[in-house]
Image: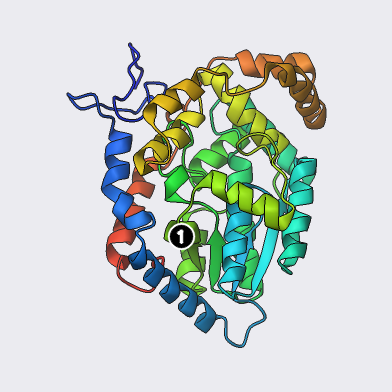
Amino acid sequence: MEKTHSQICTRCVMDTSDLGISFTSEGLCNHCIEFLDKRNKYTYKGTESDVQLDKIIARIKEAGKGREYDCVIGLSGGVDSSYAAKICIDQGLRILAVHLDNGWNSEEAVSNIKNVARKLSIDFESYVLNWDEFKDLQLSFLKASVPEADTPTDIAILAALHKVAAKYNIKSIISGGNFATEGILPETWHYNAKDLTYFNYIHKKFGNRRLKSFPTFGFMRELYYKIFKGIKMIYILNYVPYIKNDAISLLENQLSWKNYGGKHYESKYTGFIQSYYLYHKFGIDYRRATLSSQICTGEISREDALEILKLLPYKMERVEEEMKYIAKKLEISKGDFQNILDAESKWYFDYPNDQKRLNFIYNLYRRIFRKEKLGNF
C-alpha cells in the first residue's frame, strides 16, 4: 500500500497521505465519490428528513415508556455531542448524559459539560476509567507506532454507553457522530476500534499491566447489545441541518458553551494526537477529512479548504508544553516520548488483525437487517 508519489483529489482535498486512497482518470478520489453516493441517505434532506426525525423521536419515546429515561447520550463537552443533546431536549426526550472520564479532560470541556447539563436540566453520569490500566493501554498504542493512538478511548466510549444503557434498560443511544462533518475518514488513518484481535495483540506486545476493569467492545459484545438487549445507536445530527459554525454560535449564546480552540481539544490528549502527532509522524493532516466532507456538502469551497491547509494543524508555541504535560501524565521521560514520535511509522496492517472477517460479518449484518428494526432507525 506504499505510495510512491503524491496526489490530491481534484474535487475534495484528500491526498496520498491516505495509503489506501485511489483516483479515477479524472483525478477524483474514492472518498468523495463514496461520500456523494451515500450523501442522500445520511445527510439532511429538508422535509423528508424532518418526517424521518419525527418517526425516530416517536419510536424512542415509545421504547422509553415506563422507564426513567428515553435515551443515553455521550457528552464530551465538544460541539457535536453538546449540539446533539440540545436537539434531543428540543424534541422532548428524557436523556441521561454519560461522560467517559479517561483523565484527559480540558478545563473547557469540564465547564462545557456542566453548563450543558445544567442549562438543559439533564441528568448526568460520569464513567471513570482505571487510570493505571488506561495509561498502560495508551502507552501500548503509542509504542506500537500506529495512527490509532486514541483507540483505547474510542473503544471505552462505546462500551461505557452500552453498559449504562443496559443498566437502565434504555433502548436508544444518541451519538454526536454525523455524516456531514465525519463522512470521510480513511481506514489507514483510524482503523476499526472494535477489532479486538488488533487491540489485544498490541496491548499484549507493548503493554505491562493486565486489564481487569477496562471495558472492551468487540463485535460479539456489540451483537449482544443490539440483538439481545435491543439497544440501537442513533446519529441524530444526520436528520437536522448541521453546520458546525452555526452550532457553535448557538451553544455559546444559549448554553454558556466555550470554544476549546481546535477539533477534539476537549481532550488534551486527543487534541495533541490529531493535530501534532499524526502530522509529525505520519504526514496525516486530520483536517483534510473534515474539510473534504464539508466540500461535498457545500459548506466550504475547495479553494477555501486549500487555504486553511496552508496553515499548520497545530500551534507550534503549544507543542512543547503539551508534550511535557502528556509525558509527565503518562509517567515517561520527555526523551522517551520524543523517541516514540520519531520511531518508524507502522500501520494496522503491520500487526495481526481481523479485518477480513469483520468486514464480511458487518456487510452481511447490514444486508440482513437493513430494513429490520434491529438496524438503525
Q: Which residue is mark 1?
A: 240
Report the front residue among 338 and 95: 95
Name the side, left or right, on which 71 lies relative to 308. Answer: right
Q: Give coordinates of residue 211: x percent, y percent.
A: 69, 46
Q: Residue at x 55, y 48 (%)?
A: 246
Total labels drawn: 1
Residue 374 visible in the shown view: no
Q: Provide the secondary structure element on which disc 1 rests.
A: loop
Q: Give coordinates of residue 254: x percent, y percent.
A: 69, 57
Quarter of the image for residue 293 reads top left
Q: Quick check: 77 above or below 62? A: above
> Where the C terminus falls, by quadrant?
bottom left
Q: Give coordinates of residue 222: x percent, y percent.
A: 50, 60
Q: Residue at x 76, y 43 (%)?
A: 108
> Where the N terminus falls, by quadrant?
top left
Q: Give coordinates of residue 187: x percent, y percent.
A: 42, 36
Q: Residue at x 45, y 29 (%)?
A: 288
Name the side, left or right, on which 348 lies relative to 338. Answer: left
Quarter of the image for residue 278 reads top right
Q: Residue at x 42, y 41 (%)?
A: 299
Q: Quick check: 58 above or below 350? A: below
Name the side, left or right, on which 346 lies relative to 360. Answer: right
Report the front residue among 73 and 242: 242
Dot 1: few (<14), some (14–19), or many (≥20) neighbours within 10 Å? some
Q: Quick check: 111 above or below 332? A: below
Q: Quick check: 254 above or below 339? A: below
State the colouring used for the structure image.
rainbow
What residue type is disc 1 on?
Val
